[in-house]
Every structure is written in C-alpha cells, then in structure tokens.
Amino acid sequence: MPRLIVTRRSKIHGNGVFAAQDIPAGTQLIEYKGRRITPKQADAWHDEMYSGHTFLFTLNEDWIIDAGTGGNSARWINHSCAPNCIPYLHDHPTDRKKDRVIIEALRDIRKGEELTYDYGIAFDVPYTARLKKIWACRCGAPNCTGTMLKPPTHERDTTA
C-alpha cells in the first residue's frame, strides 16, 4: 500500500509532514503518539511556555502525550492559521490514559502539500510581546495572525 505521508524539511519550520499522494478530505492520516505524562510532570520537565517549541499534546485533564519520547512523525506536523488537517480526540471508554489523537484531513490535500493544523496554544498568563515573539507563527497564510497563541481560557467567549 502506498504511503500517504512523508517527513522532510519544511519552509514553515524545521521538519514537516507532506502528502505523498492526493488525500481526500476526512482521511485519517496518523495517530499522535508518545509517552503519557501528567500535567504536573509536563510542568516539571518542560518549560513549554518560554521554549516556543513543543511536542506536548493535551489528551484530557489527567494526561498529556509527550511525543518527544516515543513519538512518531505526527510530531513534525506544523501549525497553520489556515490548516488542512484537524486533530480529533478519540476517547477510550474505560481508561482516560488510553485516549488517542488522530490527525485527519480537513479538506482535500494535494500531493506535495505540507500537512498543518491549528495548535490552539493557550496559556493563562498575559500575552506579552516577548511571549508572542516566542510563539510567532510562520505559516504564511493570508489570514495569518502572526502568533500560534489563542486567547487564554479565561478570555475566550463561550457564549456563542
């Protein structure tokens, strides 16, 4: 069976993941894999907020996937303000540690196109110019916001 995706250098940032063939919308592309850690462990082991780089993916309030250990090529999928993929959480019926994240094509993707999704990064601190610079977006989309940061949880409008 032909490969759907390949990893190589990216114009957005570092490594990236690219379509090895045309991919229809709705195709499940890859599971985001890595060691399961607690939020407390993530805070102790990673200075994510000020690194500008993360392989951490929040599964739920109890578990985070750390793709820096045991991760696969899904960790190289870059952020974009106009993503062509979306991560979906698949809940395990009895064990939250076994929840999974599957990256799926949001729209049809052409062979050679880089796969991207919106990281949705949010911290519950004021967003200073320094923090916005650390988390600068380089996606190049016409609607690029210039940052990977989303409004902090306490500032999001949940009434819509």
Image: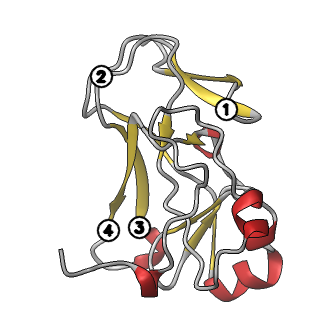
Q: Are marks 2 and 4 in contact (CB under 8 Å)?
A: no
Residue 60 position within the rendered picture, expressed as x and y whole percent measured from the top left: 44, 77
Label 3 neighbourhood size at 10 Å, few (<14), some (14-19), many (20+)?
Answer: some
Which-is-in-front pick, marks 1 and 2? Answer: 1
Question: Image check: 83 left or right of 129?
Answer: left
The image quarter containing residue 38 is bottom right
Q: Are marks 3 and 4 in contact (CB under 8 Å)?
A: yes
Q: Is residue 62 above or below residue 13?
A: below
Which-is-in-front pick, marks 2 and 3? Answer: 2
Q: Is residue 69 above or below residue 143?
A: below
In this view, the residue in front, 34 or 145, is 145
- Among the two numbered marks 4 and 1 on one chain, the one whose residue lies closer to the N terminus: 1
Say what secondary structure mark 2 lies in.
loop
Q: Residue at x 51, y 78 (%)?
A: 152
Say what secondary structure mark 3 lies in.
loop
Question: Image check: 9 left or right of 144?
Answer: right
- Among the two numbered marks 2 and 4 on one chain, the one whose residue lies closer to the N terminus: 4
Q: Amino acid at mark 1?
A: Ile
Q: Residue at x 49, y 61 (%)?
A: 120
Distance (Cα) linking label 3 and label 4: 5 Å
Q: Is residue 2 above or below residue 144?
A: above
Residue 150 position within the rendered picture, expressed as x and y whole percent measured from the top left: 50, 66
Q: Amino acid at mark 3?
A: Asp
Q: Which residue is mark 4?
A: 91
How did the renderer colour the structure? secondary structure
Q: Amino acid at mark 2?
A: Asp
Marking on residue 12: 1
- Among the two numbered marks 3 and 4 on one chain, the one whose residue lies closer to the N terminus: 4
Distance (Cα) linking label 2 and label 3: 27 Å
Residue 99 position within the rendered picture, expressed as x and y whole percent measured from the top left: 41, 67
Distance (Cα) linking label 3 and label 1: 29 Å
Q: Which residue is mark 3?
A: 99
